[in-house]
Amino acid sequence: MRYVIRGPHAGPTLLAAAVALATVTACSNGSPSGAGSPSSPSSPSPPSAVSGAPTSAAPTPSPTPTRTYPLSTAPLTVPAVRSHEPARGPGWRPVPEAGVVVAPGSGALADEARLLAGELKIAYRGAVPARAGDVELALGGKGAAESYTLTTRDNRVRITGPDEAGVFYGTRTLKQSVKGSGAMPEGVVEDGPAKPQRGLQVDTARKHFTAAWIEARLREMADLKLNQFGLHFTDDQGFRIASDSHPEVVSADHLSKAEVRRIIALARSLHITVVPEIDSPGHLGAVLRAHPDLQLRSVAGVPRRGAIDISKPASARIVDDLLREYAELFPGGWMHLGADEYQALTVRDPAASYPQLAQAARQKYGAQAGIEDLAEGWLNDRAAVVRAAGKTAKAWNDGFFRGGLVNADSRIEVEYWTGKEIGARTPTGYLAEGRKVVNLNDEYLYYVLGEPNQFTYPTGRRIYEQWTPLVLRGTTPVPARYGPQILGGRFAVWCDLSNAQTQAQVAAGIRMPLTATAQKLWDERKPAMSWAAFQALAAKVRG
């Protein structure tokens, strides 16, 4: 910008212009109030007066440009922001005078504001007008759920979103940018997730994890903008949460309900939903140790590990007792019913091996019904229990059968993990039926302790470079037209050989695979950054 003197009255105007020019020149040699140093050199200062130079006639001052800045670049965060409109300016830094404030009508964001203020080591000043140097959080706008706009201008940051989760994710972007570079660049970020379900699944049934360990993972998830934590807490090896309805099934090492409530409270504050899983009719060994009369036995009297006899009414009663109890404990919108690997269906002739199941199927569904129909009806009945409690049911894909008299309820979300089961269907078989699917592809997203059954520990690089939510089975993506039916995905820890790693080793081992998964669920497009650069950035901004 240049200052031009106009009009016939040059005397006083010229004097005022000279004073203003001197002020501009002085300001151009220092940083703007509350801002850090710019990324481009400042304009040169006027040359100093030379000793002994004539002073009788001062030269007319020439206009001096104000400080200029290059166009900003997008903040460097994990996951990367989806859109950034660059601008010229110094950006924003958390100087001591700065604070975090909540806009009028946005008092629900007070917790997010307090958390951010503590992380940036600046003051939380509450619901007061923003001033120079402040970060303001506000609810508003018509964007999609979990989206946000982050505007950096005039030495202020304003984060707005249509819901609390979106604003929270904006604070994660600000936190990471400051952690990585010391500043938030000038400009406008428009950001939001590609998929609504983005998470981590942990098998605490085979290996007990402490509440502190789980809470640490929740904090990591929050900074990665992940929003769903799957808790597989009952299996053949253990039942890991205290029970009031059936205390006899609980393992010695378990979480108390007070610990679970603390975990849930932390998760909710970080906009993460905890999804409990009570797997049935298989994987119930811990329950059946206390109720051996309900264990499935063949016609020869041979028990099947973990399988409950679904022909017995008492089997449904005990599972439903547990479903209702934990549906009340966990306030989130989902409950996982398992439904995978029912051992009665893994033999050559299920009806000959388990005639009681075949008879129960015919009695309930007609003369042409088989054991698969009985198992599908079991899944539908359990889904009705959790639906009555206000939950959406989830089940593993190998609990959905085709060609029978009974079909799984269309409202149950398919959690696709394998294509190796008997009668396996490709993912498009579920998608073509119009079902909603969540991606837990065991080729990329399964971290199985001890690497049994040809599993290998997944790498972040392979997920980052090869996997997308469309890759549901193996390495081949489904057609892009099915994208809207794929709700997201979760990275899963399974503890088949529970002593193969310590809790600390698990946390370290999943760190980069989980980070890569978060990137691809937030933005499923091919990343612009190389794996090496992404890995270095993650180390820097995540600490």
Image (tube, helix red, strand yellow):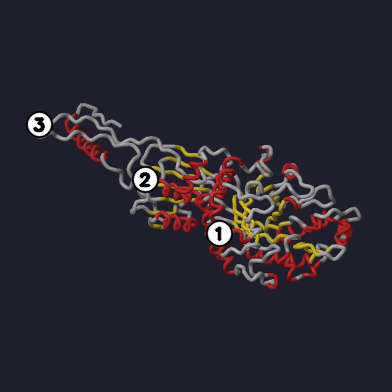
Position of residue 391 measured from the top left corner of the image (x, y, whole percent): 67, 58
The amino acid sitting under disc 1 is Ala
Quadrant where the N terminus is found in the figure: top left
The type of residue carrying mark 2 is Asn
User: x, y percentage for residue 250?
Assistant: 67, 70
Q: Which SS class for mark 1?
A: helix
Characterize the local packing of mark 3: few (<14), some (14-19) or many (20 or more) Cα atoms within 10 angstroms: few
Disc 3 is placed on an element classified as loop
First in sequence: mark 2 vs mark 1: 2
Q: Give x and y (percent) for residue 505.
A: 55, 57
Tell me: residue 252, above or below residue 421. below
**In the rendered image, which residue does mark 1 sit on?**
267
Image marks 2 and 1: residues in contact by CB distance under 8 Å: no
Q: Give residue 88's position: percent from left, percent from top.
A: 38, 37
Residue at the spot of label 2: 155
| Sequence-wise first label, 3 or 2 | 3
Mark 2: few, some, or many residues within 10 Å (few <14, many ≥20)? many
Circle nearer the viewer, 2 or 1: 1
Residue 344 or residue 84, whichever sits in front:
344
Circle 1 crowding by C-alpha within 10 Å: few under 14, some 14–19, many from 20 = many
Query: Along the polypeptide, which appears first: circle 3 or circle 1?
Result: 3
Determine which quarter of the picture holds residue 13.
top left
Foreground mark, 3 or 2? 3
Is 109 situated left or right of 476 in this image? left
Tag 3 residue? 53
Toward the viewer: 269 or 131?
269
- Image: 99 above or below 44: below
Mark 2 residue element: loop
Q: Report, in whole angstroms, how far the alpha carbon at label 3 lies from the one at label 2.
A: 42 Å
Work out how far the residue at label 2 is from the one at label 1, CA to CA, in angstroms.
Answer: 32 Å
Could you tell whether 128 is left or right of 204 in the image? Answer: left
What type is the residue that disc 3 sits on?
Ala
